[in-house]
Image (cartoon, helix red, strand yellow):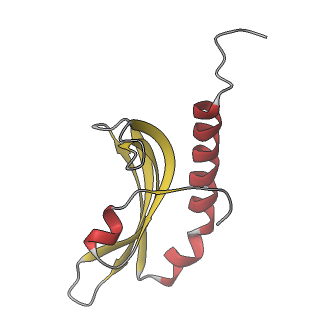
């Protein structure tokens, strides 16, 4: 087997990230059909990653992000180092949505 093929944690994280995004995309079809939820797949060039964002249409016509599954670089608050990891965002306030919650297996 070639030495240059990544088999470490980062490689597994990327594979899990891609699988999660694809699964979430397929699973979100029912929510889209209902009409008040929209989904956007975004590439984050500034941090080198991508994410699937879920928005709920509010009464005033604005979209509110309430959930996101992302794979990009961010600063780990425990180690204070930059990491590239699969994580999610959830919550109703901007403060809650800014938190990078690590994916720890299972939903």
Q: Quadrant of the N terminus?
A: top right
Q: Position of residue 51 (x, y in %)?
A: 44, 51
Q: Residue furthest bottom?
A: 59
Q: Where is residue 69 in the image (x, y as percent from the top left)?
A: 48, 57
Q: Position of residue 78 (x, y in %)?
A: 42, 48
Q: Which residue lies furthest to the left in this view?
A: 60
Residue occupying image coordinates x 35% and y 43%: 75
Residue occupying image coordinates x 46% and y 38%: 84
Q: Which residue lies furthest to the right in this view?
A: 1
Q: In this view, does 96 lie above or below 24?
A: below
Residue occupying image coordinates x 37% and y 78%: 56
Residue occupying image coordinates x 58% and y 38%: 14
Q: Where is residue 59 in the image (x, y as percent from the top left)?
A: 26, 90
- Of the pair 65 and 94, the residue shown nearer to us: 94
In the figure, residue 95 lies in which quadrant? bottom left
Q: In this view, does 7 lie above or below 69?
A: above
Q: Is residue 10 above or below residue 28?
A: above
Count of numbered marks:
0
- Left or right relative to 45: residue 105: right
- Left or right relative to 11: residue 86: left
Q: Quadrant of the C terminus?
A: bottom right
- Left or right relative to 61: residue 73: right
- Of the pair 21 and 33, the residue shown nearer to us: 21
Q: Is residue 45 above or below residue 70?
A: above
Q: Which residue lies furthest to the front in this view?
A: 79
């Amino acid at each position: 087997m070639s030495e240059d093929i990544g088999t470490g944690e980062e490689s597994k994280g990327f594979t899990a990230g891609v699988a999660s995004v694809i699964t979430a995309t397929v699973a979100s079809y029912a929510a889209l059909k209902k009409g008040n939820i929209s989904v956007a797949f975004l590439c984050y060039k500034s941090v080198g990653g991508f994410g699937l964002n879920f928005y709920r249409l509010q009464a005033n016509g604005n979209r509110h992000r309430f959930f996101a599954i992302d794979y990009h670089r961010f600063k780990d608050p425990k180690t204070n180092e930059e990491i590239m990891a699969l994580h999610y965002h959830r919550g109703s306030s901007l403060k809650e949505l800014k938190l990078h919650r690590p994916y720890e297996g299972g939903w």
